[in-house]
Image (cartoon, helix red, strand yellow):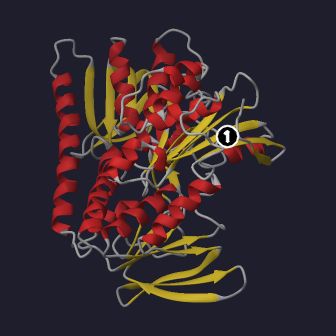
Amino acid sequence: MEQYDLIVIGGGPSGYAGAMRALDFKKKVLLIEKNRIGGAGVYDGVLTSKTLWEYSQKVCSIREMIPNYDADYQDIVKTLKEAVHERKTQMTHHLDLLEEQPSRLFFYENGSASFINKHTIFIKKQDGTSKQVQAEHILIATGSRPRYLPNIPIDEHIIMTSDGVKNISQIPKSLVVLGAGVIGCEFATIFSNMGKTKVYLIDKADRILPFEDDDVAELISESLEKHGATIHHGSSLKRMEIKNEQVEYELEYKDGLTEVITVEKALVSVGRVANVEELKLENAGVKLNDRGSIWDDDTQTNISNIYVAGDVTTEMALVNVGEREARHAVVRMFGPTIKPLSYQNISTIMFLNPEVASVGMSEQDCNKKGLAHKVVKLDYSTNARAITMRKTKGFFKIIVTNDNGMRILGMRAVGEHASSAIQAVAYLIHTNQGIRELADMMHPHPSIIEGVQECLRMLLGKSIYKSYIFKDKLKCFVCENNVCTPVESLL
């Protein structure tokens, strides 16, 4: 029987990253992928949806100058295929060359994997043959899939999840999105940007993006509605059916009123489910948690030689988190003793219009924990780069401790190039450093990150624009006991 130091089950972003990290330790690695290398991250997830978003942003910009501009759907399909092919080719070519290395440390199998015991894996290969392999350690990285609701007839053509978007043959005239979280809002943004789709967004809560602060959700809501979207706030879905090749759905609002609407397509975005059913985890004694995903303690399962990473834990379904977990797990297996992973200060991007970038705690996080804090907020319209781009909708917001040390607790940037603005602050949070060095650096001009610098200067009482003059552009607050009081200076 073939023996390995590590068997990785799943060739998506997490499994791929884990296998590559094990090679750094000169370990013999077998990577098993059931379908295609790259997993949902390439074919049905991040790469495809973000390529669509980038395309829709370009269309939106063109339509600002040419209102009657009509996006060519075949061009969209071509762009998507090119992006997927480029990424897939990179990843598979890399693996092919690794298998040819004289060291013979890397091996790949295309097939489904299941446990025989905690060290032995059964592989049912795509060509119909099968084999058994063993390893000292095993990393489970089988990812997740969209959650289906039993009362909704999802066919991935008329009523779709994110997996079915690739089946669309033309831009729909109308679309309803069920779920007002990140994925739902991203797809609502993509299709409303195109200018050809009447978008409806079903929001059970009083506002979209309930995990974010009010000001973030409000700005994104305004943008969606500006682009013709209708948000069904405070609504519950009573039924959704396919009738005459279209979607009919009925809503009930908090006041008891009901409404029936017919659209061309529907997109259901109500969370994800861990891919665990085919693994036969019981043969290895691996436990699940109450969410039906794999239980872990800092990437280690209840079986000491078996680790887990990525969406299969459903802890936080982000590519950067999954890759980091897999690399961390491999270091725990073969490297020196390291500190546990921290999920407190993860940098994230929401591909909306405008884009939203965040790191660390939000204001509502601080309020829930009863943490006294200070907040500075700077409008995008004061930033020279935003002015040159004519993209002045948005803001920078930094949250710090309510003391002289002003340790950064979190940041939100909403606007053009927001994702480029958060990394320096993320580093300060990660290293527990103060704000003065970053505030005093010479930032490039004109640049979006100058907005971060001005926020830090506001904290230090030395901003160029004064908050007591531009009261609608620069805002300072001290928040205690869930009460925020505006102040002219935070010093």
* Of residues 118 and 457, the one drawn nearer to the viewer in this rendering: 457
- SS at badge 1: strand
The residue lying at 27 percent from left, 45 percent from top is 36
Q: Position of residue 128 (x, y in %)?
A: 24, 46
As drawn, the residue found furthest toward the front would be: 469
Mark 1 surroundings within 10 Å by alpha-carbon count, few (fewer than 14), some (14 through 19), many (20 or more):
many
The residue lying at 24 percent from left, 73 percent from top is 170
Q: Is residue 261 left or right of residue 401?
A: left
Residue 254 placement: quadrant: bottom right
> In which quadrant is the N terminus drawn?
top left
Q: Is residue 348 left or right of residue 403?
A: left
Q: Position of residue 325 (x, y in %)?
A: 49, 30
Q: Position of residue 437 (x, y in %)?
A: 54, 18
* Of residues 297 and 44, the one drawn nearer to the viewer in this rendering: 44
> In which quadrant is the C terminus drawn?
top right
Whether residue 34 is visible here, answered yes or no, is no
* Vertical side of 200 occupied by 125: above or below: above
The residue lying at 63 percent from left, 76 percent from top is 236
Q: Amino acid at mark 1?
A: Val
* Vertical side of 232 occupied by 138: above or below: above
Q: Which residue is mark 1?
A: 375
Q: Position of residue 398 (x, y in %)?
A: 60, 38
* Of residues 311 and 490, the one drawn nearer to the viewer in this rendering: 490
What is the tally of numbered marks visible in this picture? 1
Whether residue 253 is visible here, answered yes or no, is yes
* Vertical side of 399 occupied by 67: above or below: below
As drawn, the residue found furthest toward the right would be: 481
* Vertical side of 469 occupied by 490: above or below: above
As drawn, the residue found furthest toward the top would be: 336
* Of residues 316 and 36, the one drawn nearer to the viewer in this rendering: 316
